[in-house]
């Protein structure tokens, strides 16, 4: 499922496709804003979005085989809720 498919699914619950697109865009925007402020976003029964630090590490250029240094960075992470994890089994 991609964003367009999600908008079409939400459209089944609202009157217009433009309203559905506005809802989906707003949800994604608010999740993004919270993560950029280093806040967790918890959706009960679904999971939690949070920011995590990735430490610096050594990598390898696949084309040349040369070893390179990959710097430390922050990455968004998703941790599924317990019930969601159990549904996936």
Image (cartoon, rainbow, N blue to C red):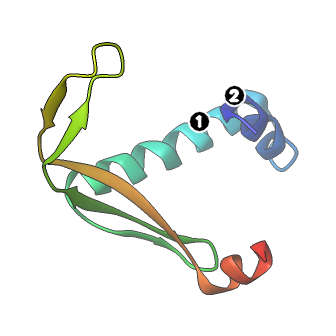
User: Quarter of the image holding residue 54?
Assistant: bottom left
Image location of residue 65, percent across then percent down: 28, 22
Query: In the image, 46: left or right of 2?
Result: left
Q: Residue at x 76, y 72 (%)?
A: 88
Density class for disc 2 (Cα within 10 Å; few <14, some 14-19, many ≥20) is: few
Density class for disc 1 (Cα within 10 Å; few <14, some 14-19, many ≥20) is: few
User: Quarter of the image holding residue 80?
Assistant: bottom right
Q: Which residue is mark 2?
A: 18
Image location of residue 78, percent across then percent down: 47, 62
Q: Residue at x 35, y 13 (%)?
A: 63
Kindly state the secondary structure of the residue where label 1 is placed: helix
Q: Which residue is mark 1?
A: 22
Discs 1, 2 touching: Cβ within 8 Å: yes
Measured along the vertical axis of the image, is residue 24 above or below residue 39?
A: above
Q: Quadrant of the N terminus?
A: top right
Residue 73: give its label: none
Q: Residue at x 78, y 77 (%)?
A: 89
Query: In the image, 77: left or right of 19?
Result: left
Q: Residue at x 81, y 35 (%)?
A: 8
In the rendered image, the residue lying farthest to the top is 63
Query: In the image, 88: left or right of 39?
Result: right
| Total numbered labels placed on residues in the image | 2
CA distance separating discs 1 and 2:
6 Å
Image location of residue 66, percent across then percent down: 20, 22
In the rendered image, the residue lying farthest to the right is 12
């Amino acid at each position: 499922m991609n964003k367009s498919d999600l908008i079409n699914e939400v459209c089944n619950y609202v009157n217009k496709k433009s309203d559905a697109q506005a809802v989906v865009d707003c949800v994604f925007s608010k999740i993004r804003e919270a993560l950029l402020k280093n806040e967790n976003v918890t959706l009960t029964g679904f999971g939690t979005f949070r920011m995590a630090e990735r430490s610096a590490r050594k990598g390898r250029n696949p084309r040349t085989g040369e070893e390179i240094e990959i710097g430390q960075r922050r990455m968004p992470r998703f941790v599924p809720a317990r019930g969601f994890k159990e549904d996936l089994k």
